[in-house]
Image (cartoon, helix red, strand yellow):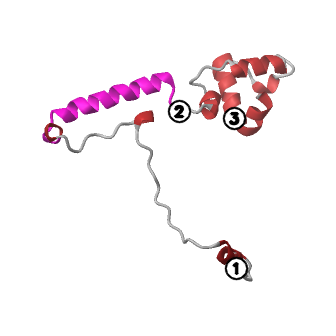
């Protein structure tokens, strides 16, 4: 886990070790062992950069989720006192992990495998460089 985290997100590991443990990752192996660093990495708090990167919940820590719940509840309370709220229309969209995932409209052209093969086998020309 430590080697992977350092390779994929070295900056986040460096920042978390400095912030949470006041350790310079460059001193690993001299000031503290690699095993010690691996144990510290696993024990980083949930709001640390590394934990958020590898978490299935992404940036939504427990505290942030609670704050989103409060904001959503307040938005609904305010909305209920409006004309739209009394008629049940234009309800505010929730934020945070409760928000509906936004779907991007994908534009493309459907083709068969044979058509794709023909397109990819067409001769290509060089693109002139601007410089």
Q: Quadrant of residue 27?
A: top right
Marks 2 and 3 sit apart, C-alpha to C-alpha, by 17 Å
Q: Residue at x 45, y 44 (%)?
A: 101
Q: Secondary structure at mark 2?
A: loop
Q: Residues within 10 Å of mark 3 (few under 14, many from 20)?
A: some
Instruction: Identify the disc placed on residue 11.
Output: 3
Q: Residue at x 61, y 30 (%)?
A: 49
Picture coordinates of residue 80, whole percent (x, y): 18, 33
Instruction: Identify the disc placed on residue 118.
Output: 1
The residue under label 2 is 59
Dot placed on the residue nearer the N-terminal end, 1 or 3: 3
Q: Is residue 59 left or right of residue 30?
A: left
Start and end of the magenta stretch? Answer: 59-84
Picture coordinates of residue 28, whole percent (x, y): 82, 22
Picture coordinates of residue 38, whole percent (x, y): 77, 21
Q: Quadrant of residue 98?
A: top left
Dot placed on the residue nearer the N-terminal end, 2 or 3: 3
Q: Residue at x 63, y 22 (%)?
A: 19
> Which of 98/5 is in front?
98
Task: Please identify the quadrant where the N terminus is shown.
Answer: top right
Task: Please identify the quadrant where the C terminus is shown.
Answer: bottom right
């Amino acid at each position: 886990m430590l080697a992977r985290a350092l390779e994929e997100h070295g900056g986040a590991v460096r920042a978390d070790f400095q912030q949470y443990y006041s350790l310079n990752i460059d001193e690993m192996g001299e000031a503290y062992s690699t095993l010690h660093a691996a144990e510290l990495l696993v024990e980083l708090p949930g709001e640390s950069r590394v934990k958020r990167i590898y978490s299935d919940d992404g940036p939504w820590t427990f505290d942030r989720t609670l704050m989103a719940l409060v904001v959503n509840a307040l938005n609904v309370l305010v909305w209920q006192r409006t004309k739209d709220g009394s008629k049940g229309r234009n309800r505010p969209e929730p934020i945070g992990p409760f928000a509906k995932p936004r779907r991007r409209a994908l534009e493309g052209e459907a083709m068969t495998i044979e058509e794709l093969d023909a397109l990819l086998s067409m001769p290509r020309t060089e693109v002139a460089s601007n410089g």
